[in-house]
Amino acid sequence: MFDLIIIGMGPGGYEAALTALRKKINVAIVEKSKLGGNCLNRACIPTKYLRSGAHSIEKLQKLKAYGIEVKDYSIDYKAAFENKEKSIGFLRKSLEQLLKSKKVPVFKGKGKIIDKNKVEVSYPDGSKEIIEGKNIIIATGSYPASVGKLIPDGNYIITTEDYMEKLDTLPESMLIVGGGVAGCEIGYIAKSYGCQVYITELQDRLLPSDIISPEISKNLLKKLNSVGIKTFFNTTVEDFSIEESKIKVKLSNGEIIVVDKILLTVGRKPNTQDIDTIGIEKDEKGFIKVNSYLQTNFENIYAIGDVVNSPMLAHIASYEAKIVLHNITSQDKKIPDYTLTPWAIFSGYEIGHVGLNEETAKKQGLEVISGYYPFTYNEKAVDELEPEGYVRLYFEKNSKKIISVDVVGIGASEIIHQIAVFIKEGYTADQVHEFIYFHPSLSEIFAYASYDIAVGKLF
């Protein structure tokens, strides 16, 4: 009898295991695939690795400004892919060694809950084993969704997981169906490494989400178009056919394009099929229903990450894992608070955000004012030859307290955390402005973005 069984070893399961070990809890792990889950092996980490390469290709064109003239260079996507695999392999091996050193058993099969304290593990060879635990955490993540006739076949029609894990040679051309985060990230990578990229989006802009400002979408569109990515909005794939090893695609706007592959980036679904036989409650979309403490309808069975209807982000899974471990080991229960969830996108620009946005603020009855400043005049960004982009700080009009930030440009995913602290501490525009920032730094752009609110307009 283990104290805790964790089904799934992605970011949520990994954090749960680490926290359990620190709390001296006897833990077992069930994982049917690679340790690290989708994030480490097929999403977050490989995407950022390849995006770093793509951005370096773009930066290479600017090196003459530093007195560095690169007369001849080549781009080898296969080498980038192989080295990405080495980096991921190192991280995965480190995790394996940690678990081994702590004598944590890893059952390498598919887990199914057959009793509130029992998990049946099905192995690839067809054999099965039952393990028992006082508590169980479901952290099985999600899988790529498909749409209409576009069913992934791993060859002509592929998923993001196929792209990141299997596609070691880029096609000459590719249609990306879906202009959300994954589509914009992979689109920029593929184009930078020499693939002709088309993006089709059902809605009227890139990144069509209530939590993403249209201003961000507009700036990213301009950037992606500038590097040669062709975009179609309010458009779907009406039909397609395979002809001479190419895909002939008819779009709903009447255009015909011919590509080598179609990449589906139309969202993800919770990986909860066949997870149990005991009646764990799910909603109509397959998300596991949990209470405020992340418990299912069985009090000793918890669910975290993409399988519950919270933001589908790796760091949310990790955050929820910590909450669950606290609730398992303490009578003083904690409730997750998603108010200051940061998110970032790594595409033609690095984009970051934390806090409310204008739309969500309005729904809460808040009147919002904002301060803006471009990286064009930030000395550190200019030194780095990265003057594109901007910062926009949002404040509640009456109190002038900061409620959120949008960062488009260099260092976005890092510097948003400073604003998260300001929001949590209730900083006003005056306090944001008067904070002493190191010079030159990217962060000092916040002093300038708050100028108009804290001191007064110059123009």
Image (tube, rainbow, N blue to C red):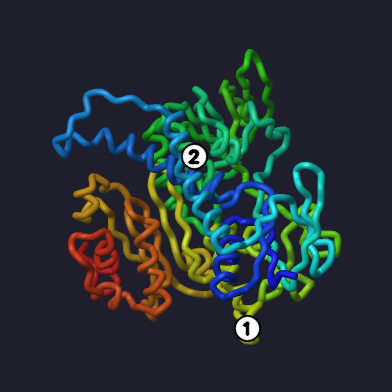
Residue 351: x, y in percent? 41, 53
Q: Is residue 301 toward the left or the right of residue 388 in the image?
A: right
Residue drawn at point x = 73 percent, y = 33 percent:
149
Q: Quadrant of residue 222?
A: top left
- In this picture, is 157 found above or below 241? below
Please identify the quadrant where the C terminus is shown. bottom left
Q: Closest to the observer: 201 or 283?
A: 283
Question: Above or below — where is 54 with respect to 251?
Answer: below
| In the foreground, 48 or 257 | 48
The residue pinned by badge 2 equals 85
Seen in the image, is 320 located left or right of residue 50? right
Query: Residue reaching furthest top?
Result: 244
Residue 75 at what x, y percent from top left? 37, 27
Mark 2: amino acid? Glu
Q: Secondary structure at mark 2?
A: helix
Q: For the view shown, which residue lies furthest in the bottom direction?
A: 331
| Mark toward the start of the polypeptide (1 vs 2) | 2
Q: In this figure, which residue is indicated by the disc labeled 1?
A: 330
Task: Provide the secondary structure element on which disc 1 rests.
Answer: loop
